[in-house]
Amino acid sequence: MGKKLFYDHEMNAAWRIAREKGMEYARARGHSKNSLHNDQKDMLYVACEMQDIGCTDPADIDQVVFNKWRGYTMSDENRSGKAITEKGFKKRKEALILLLKANKLEDPLSIVQMHRSKIVQDEIKFWSPEELDAMTLRALEVFEQEPEKRAAAIAHILHIVCPPRREDTASMKWAWVNIEEEFILFPAKKNGRQPGNMIQPRFTPILRAWKEITSEFPGGDEFIFPSSMAQTSGSTKVNRPHVTGKTISKHLEYIRSTTVMPDGSQPQKLSSHKYRHSFAMRALKQGCKLSFIAKVLGDTLATVEQFYSRFLLNAAHMAEFDKMMREQNHRIPAINTAQPSWLMRNPKPSATARQLNIAEGFRLFMENKPAGNGSGRSGYGRWGERAPAVDSRGGRWGILILA
């Protein structure tokens, strides 16, 4: 755990009252429990840092104060001794905006909202299919041969099937896993969506066996990872019926760190969240629809497009490209032409049946064209043909009209 640098008692009356109003405003907006925790923490950071630079009241924030605060937090002169990133500053700024809105401080609010964070997206990191497959084989091996590490194998299987966020994995319930019909569907804590996916048949016997094992422990009938099965560190502050997200991360890291690839190397050392990146990138490369990926991850289509699809061109894109460039990219040998035979050329499009019929009709007309001046006078039509004589029995075209 990192060293605590900010304390509630450091806030003066103005900042303390402003934060209290900010928290009430956040509750009125329906922020989740986790969001409220972050709101309270980030507002504390802002209040302490503002006081560090001499701003004792949020109403005193102007352009000079804001720029001074930004420079302080994003330098090595701040309390931690290490500059925060643009992403970190954006979180602080959002907390400050929440506080200013709650206190109806319009002038400071307009100054803070004027700032735009320049966030450069990092290159996305993920495991390759070969790495994931090797880790899965290792998890199956662990479940069979290392009884004390079976929870790690189950955690990996869940993250392969439907990679949740680690807190969702920690609180996963058996009621959300239908072993008989082979699917998982659970509520995500972060956004309330219902991520889900089908379970591969090879995993169902393992999940069924694990359910029997957990049923022997308190809470095991309800939770996949009951706290009664976990080793306690002695520093637990909250009594939970299930393990924590940190425990899930340790389980997943055990599988990764004990996996050996066919060439003797190990999978990349990445965080547990990279299971989500790996699933999305693998599905995109195989041409899966964005709606499928969004459902499995519990994200929006916009999130999938923004954070994953921008990194590659999938099969659907390639198919559209081929459709567009098919005629341009097709080349044929220049045989029976005035060009060298070794030269590849663009083919001329073949004539349609209609075009051939028109051409043949014109050829026959020219071969059988009667002599004449083609002026259209003296009984000749537009093309120089003599107009047909009128037949007294059948009209102009010699058609006999019956009474």
Image: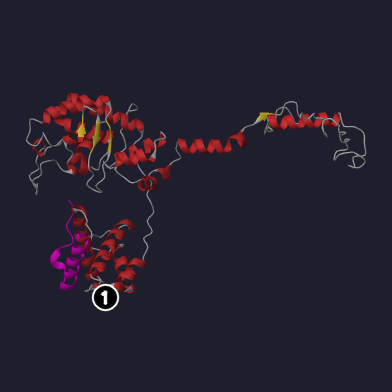
x 80%, y 28%: residue: 400
Please indicate, yes or no, whether residue 106 appears anywhere in the rendered image.
yes
Q: Which residue is mark 1?
A: 60
In the image, is residue 8 part of the stretch drawn in magenta? Answer: yes
| Coordinates of residue 142 in the picture (x, y in percent) | 20, 27
The colour style of the image is secondary structure
In the image, is residue 30 part of the stretch drawn in magenta? Answer: no
Q: Secondary structure at mark 1?
A: helix
| Coordinates of residue 184 in the picture (x, y in percent) | 24, 34
For badge 1, the amino acid type reads Asp
Indicate the quadrant containing the C terminus: top left, top right, bottom left or bottom right: top right
* Highlighted range, magenta: 1-27
Please indicate, yes or no, whether residue 146 appears anywhere in the rendered image.
no
360 vs 213, nearest the viewer: 360
x 82%, y 28%: residue: 364
Question: Quarter of the image holding residue 374?
Answer: top right
How many neighbours does mark 1 have within 10 angstroms: few (below 14), some (14-19), or many (20 or more)? few
- Judged left or right of residue 321, residue 66 is left
